[in-house]
Each structure stands twice: as structure tokens, then as C-alpha cells.
Amino acid sequence: MKSQASQLFYRKATSADVELIKAIIVESVHGLGSGDYNEIQRNTALGSAFGLDTELINDKTYFVVEAESEVIACGGWSKRKTLFGGDKQAGRQSEFLDPKKESARIRAFFVKPNWARLGIGRSLIELCETEALKHGFHSAELVATLPGHRLYLTCGYIGDEKVEYKLPGDVAIHFIPMKKTLS
Ligand SMILES: CC(C)(COP(=O)(O)OP(=O)(O)OC[C@H]1O[C@@H](n2cnc3c(N)ncnc32)[C@H](O)[C@@H]1OP(=O)(O)O)[C@@H](O)C(=O)NCCC(=O)NCCS
């Protein structure tokens, strides 16, 4: 278990980080998601709902966290309509949101298991909210995994209703839509 003593660096992700981010997503989903989702759900979601959305990297709205010369977490926000999912997720909506009327998206937070519960997820959310506010958004919404719901609740996001999403191969998974007013 790591400690809060390590120095953490938050920076924008680049295309050079793609393979590292993909590895973190797999490690995080299996290491921190096994209490909420079974192995079939996790493996199926990793090919779609939990994948990397490279549009966020191109938009410069995705961040990585480094510690001890290693990338240990990632997460971001978006000014586009897609609510969740990687490049392979069906139903993507790349249109830009209207910050005056619509909510920024909080997207794809994954922390390496041995760096969990050190406040990294919370700090990433604060960073994303600050950036969204700078871009004129007044609210943020997201589709939470069940592990993510515990984090977002403590960060002021509202939403408790579990919604079933169909993944490829007739596998179903529960997510929770959540929203927060930014100030
Ligand atoms: C969800 C996730 C990103 C949280 O990251 P994290 O860095 O561990 O979260 P933080 O340390 O910032 O947690 C902040 C607070 O959120 C709550 N919280 C976070 N994880 C929790 C858990 N497993 N159980 C209960 N509360 C939790 C706690 O209130 C925590 O504060 P505390 O540690 O002082 O009690 C991480 O668990 C993860 O990567 N999960 C697997 C992938 C996933 O499902 N991502 C979400 C996509 S929507």
C-alpha cells in the first residue's frame, strides 16, 4: 500500500501515454471493480464501456497522474456529448456541448489499485471541474460505475438510480447517472 507521502504530478495526457493508460484501465477495473462486477462483466466492459476515449486526449481534456516516475491514474472531462465509453463504445456523440445550457462530462477515472484511497480521484475531479468552469460550464454530469459512485457522491454529485446498460454479447452492467452544479 502506498502512502500520501509520495509526490504526485498531474499533467495533460498525450498520445505517448495511450498504452500506459490502457494498462492502468485494465489493472484498475480488475483490481478495484471485482467487488461490484463479475469477471465476465469486467472483461466485456473493458472492450467497450471502460476503454480509452482518445478524443479526450486530442481535446487536451484528459489527465494522467505520475508518482515515482510512473503513471498511476488517469481521468478527465469533456466538452463533447458522449457520456461514457472508449473509442469502441457504440453510440458515441462527438458533437460539442453548449456550456450555457448543457453539462460538461466527467469521464473515465481509473486509479491503480495500490494507489487507491489516497485522494487522487478527488483531486482529479477538482481539476476537471476547474477546467470545465474555465470553459464556461455551470454543471457537470457523468455515468458512474458502482465503484465510481462512492467517489462522486463524496464530491457532491447527485444520483442514486442504477441503470442497466447492455454490453456486447448480451452482458448487462449497472451504472449510475449523476450530476452536480459547479460553482
Ligand atoms: C473510483 C476510483 C477512481 C476512486 O479513486 P480513488 O483515488 O481511490 O478515490 P479517492 O481516494 O479520491 O476517494 C475520495 C473519497 O471517495 C470515497 N471513496 C472512494 N473509493 C471508495 C471505496 N472503494 N469505498 C468507499 N468510499 C470510497 C471516500 O469517501 C474517499 O475518501 P476517504 O478515502 O477519505 O474515505 C477508483 O476506485 C477506481 O479507479 N475504480 C475502478 C475504476 C472505476 O470504476 N472508475 C470509475 C469510473 S466512473
Image (spheres, rainbow, N blue to C red):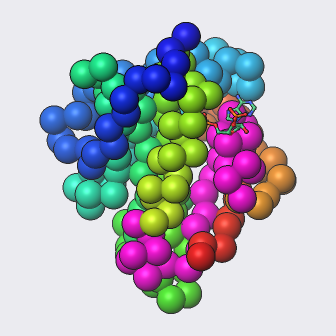
Q: Quadrant of residue 159?
A: bottom right
- Give the extent of the magenta segment: 131-156
Q: Is 161 on the left or on the right of 175, as rendered?
A: right
Q: Residue at x 74, y 19 (%)?
A: 35
Q: Residue at x 50, y 89 (%)?
A: 100
Q: Quadrant of the C terminus?
A: bottom right
Tell which of 92 and 107 is nearer to you.
Answer: 107
Q: Residue at x 34, y 50 (%)?
A: 62
Against 7, is 136 above or below? Answer: below
Against 36, is 164 above or below? Answer: below
Q: Position of residue 154 (x, y in %)?
A: 73, 48
Q: Is 83 on the left or on the right of 38, as rendered?
A: left
Q: Quadrant of the N terminus?
A: top right
Q: Quadrant of residue 148?
A: top right
Q: Quadrant of residue 96?
A: bottom left
Residue 108 seen from this side: no
Against 88, is 40 above or below? Answer: above
Q: Position of residue 51 (x, y in %)?
A: 43, 36
Q: Position of residue 130 (x, y in %)?
A: 45, 66
**Residue 101: in magenta span:** no
Residue that lies at the very extreme toward the top in this rendered image:
1
Residue that lies at the very extreme toward the front in this rendered image:
5
Tell which of 47 and 76 is nearer to you.
Answer: 76
**Residue 142: in magenta span:** yes
Q: Residue at x 62, y 21 (%)?
A: 32
Residue that lies at the very extreme toward the bottom in this rendered image:
100
Residue 101 seen from this side: yes
Tell which of 41 and 13 is nearer to you.
Answer: 13
